[in-house]
Image: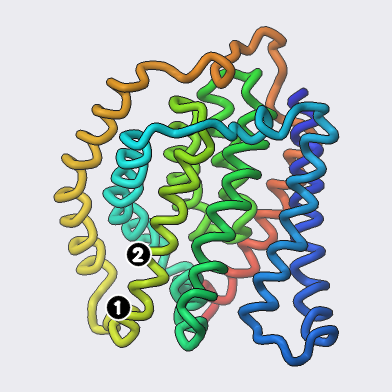
Amino acid sequence: MTKRTNQYFLFVFLYFILCSNVLSWLLPMIFPFVSPMLLNIILQCIIFIPLLIIYPITEKKSIKDCYSLHRLHWKDAFISIGIAFFSLPFLAFVVVLTSPLQPNIAEEAMVSLSNQNIWVSLLFIAVQPALFEELLFRGAALTGYRHLGWIKAMVMSAFLFAMLHLNLQQALYAFLFGCIFAFLVQRTGSIFASMLPHFFVNGLNCVSMYFMSDQIGTPEHLSIFTQLFQVGVQCLMFFPFLLGLFYWFIRRHPAPVPHMAQPNISGEKIWSASLIIMVVIFVIFSAIFILPSLFA
């Protein structure tokens, strides 16, 4: 089963890269009067919807089982969003730490979209990723790897989520959030435990971009050590709240729900040719982003 899941996600990688490149060139020609933002929304639908339809069919399982479409208690929704919010300084720390290797790609994308309608931007930046990415990685990936045990399933879903970003900087904080989101889903048994915080984080960034657009970016006179110190202080301030929320959450859910915690009886190995190819693809794309900075 591990080999089959790896093969599916290799298909995801190749399909994602192919569609992203071909359709970003083709769609403006087909719809010349449609705005770039709406074209991006169409592109995301074309990429993700077929992938999400294919998985339950190939696995011969119900959509509800594949994607953990179960109700979420309001307290768990509140805790999940709180955990995501108090994790943000740690995400910022990763961005600052990797800034000498490459610019903040996510921030640059936000700036380029700052003149778009805020509701359309929210759909593209917050709604679509929270829906499509969570169904794919905290749904399909966790389902596909759950026979390995909950820890390996959590790490693998986060690892694939990180690699699909195809650059080192975003991959590092995507892995951090991927582990957190997978943990929340495994303990509650509901995909909404990751959808809601994912939407909240991206939506918060989107709204901040509009109301503080003149403050986006870090003043160039601040050294990386100063930036790390400032963000590090925020991390220390937020850490007790983050720890408290995790404690509250674990008290509510001491262990993963049974169907998310299957023991690795088969003794299957994680690595296969498909996974190795994905890693090679990720390394190549990461190098494309990093090498210009190293030789600048």
**Between residues 173 and 39, which one lies in front from this camera angle?**
39
Distance between mark 1 and mark 2 Cα atoms: 10 Å
Q: Residue 282 location in percent, x, y? A: 67, 54
Residue at 49% across, 60% down: 169
Report which quarter residue 286 is drawn in: bottom right
Q: Work out which residue is located at the far top of the displayed protein and give it.
A: 265
Q: Which residue is mark 1?
A: 218
Q: Quadrant of the N terminus?
A: top right
Residue at 20% across, 34% down: 244
**Between residues 32 and 241, which one lies in front from this camera angle?**
32
Using residue 28 as the reference point, say whether residue 202 is left or right of it: left
User: Contact, CB < 8 Å: mark 1 with mark 2?
Assistant: yes
What's the residue type where badge 2 is placed? Val
What's the residue type where badge 1 is placed? Thr
**Between residues 179 and 184, which one lies in front from this camera angle?**
184
- Of helix, strand and loop, which one carries label 1? loop
Instruction: Say above or below: 113 vs 85.
Output: below
Instruction: Say above or below: 64 vs 200.
Output: above
Q: Which residue is mark 2?
A: 96
Q: Residues within 10 Å of mark 1 (few under 14, many from 20)?
A: few
Instruction: Say above or below: 11 vs 199.
Output: above
Colour approach in the figure: rainbow
Report which quarter residue 89 is drawn in: bottom left
Q: Residue 113 location in percent, x, y? A: 51, 81
Residue at 83% across, 79% down: 26
**Between residues 159 and 25, which one lies in front from this camera angle?**
25
